[in-house]
Amino acid sequence: GDSVTQMEGPVTLSEEAFLTINCTYTATGYPSLFWYVQYPGEGLQLLLKATKADDKGSNKGFEATYRKETTSFHLEKGSVQVSDSAVYFCALSMTGGGNKLTFGTGTQLKVEL
Amino acid sequence: NAGVTQTPKFRVLKTGQSMTLLCAQDMNHEYMYWYRQDPGMGLRLIHYSVGEGTTAKGEVPDGYNVSRLKKQNFLLGLESAAPSQTSVYFCASSMLQGLVVEQYFGPGTRLTVT
């Protein structure tokens, strides 16, 4: 079945450091890809998305590019802030069938001053 | 516009007790979902609904039942709670529009079964 693998955390960075969180997927077709963020004590919020190969999703300084050849959707940010501390989930969805999401296990990010 | 709301926020049950979690959305979304979140396992889909009066099983449906009698509400029931059902439960909804459909999540219900 479809699956998402993302790097384990926690990831601890200093403020203004560069962030990369790796995400790879396995799917039988051509999925849409998502990054969701969960701040402490809250539900998940969509951070960015991409629907086809070579699409780049971006939001709040975060970016991820849909790489079909490597089945990857790595999340990057050039300069993290303390307020970016959260858990980040990579997910995929196949068209139809209720638009269900398949999530990775999540990566906790902690940004320190 | 409240988005997706969940009731209750916290609950402690004894093994064998029953309860119902309520999810409500005011965005007129067709699709609704129930997930559970466990440490190191991400979110796993329990049941989902593609419209009023319809439900379908997700990845981990055993021990749960659901109902979607009204479009805006999606209920998750535990008939006989077990300690393995200790988790954080999230409801989500999405609209029927195009090929890429964002899901909107509620704040979660933390359930402990002792």
Image (tube, rainbow, N blue to C red):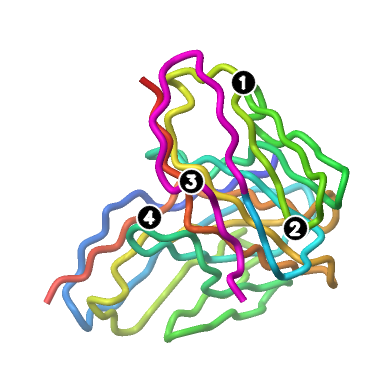
- Please tell me which residue is depicted at 56% across the width and 23% down the height of the picture: B18
The chain to which mark 2 is attached is B
Q: What amino acid is found at the position of numbered circle 1 in the picture?
A: Glu
* CB atoms of marks 3 and 1 within 8 Å: no
The chain to which mark 3 is attached is B
Report how far apart the C-alphas of labels 2 and 1 lie in the structure: 23 Å
Boundaries of the magenta span = B1-22
Quickly name the residue at label 4: A107
The chain to which mark 4 is attached is A
Q: What amino acid is found at the position of numbered circle 3 in the picture?
A: Pro
The chain to which mark 1 is attached is B
- Please tell me which residue is depicted at 51% across the width and 49% down the height of the picture: A104
Quickly name the residue at label 1: B79
Viewer-proximal residue among B57 and A65: B57
Tags 2 and 1 both on a single chain = yes
Tags 3 and 1 both on a single chain = yes
The question of residue B68 being in magenta is answered with no
Asked where in the image residue A68 lies, by quadrant, the reply is bottom right
Report how far apart the C-alphas of labels 4 and 3 lie in the structure: 27 Å
Please state the horizontal and vertical placement of residue B8, each as a whole percent of the image: 48, 46
Quickly name the residue at label 2: B72
Q: Nearer the viewer, mark 4 or mark 2?
A: 2
Tags 4 and 3 both on a single chain = no
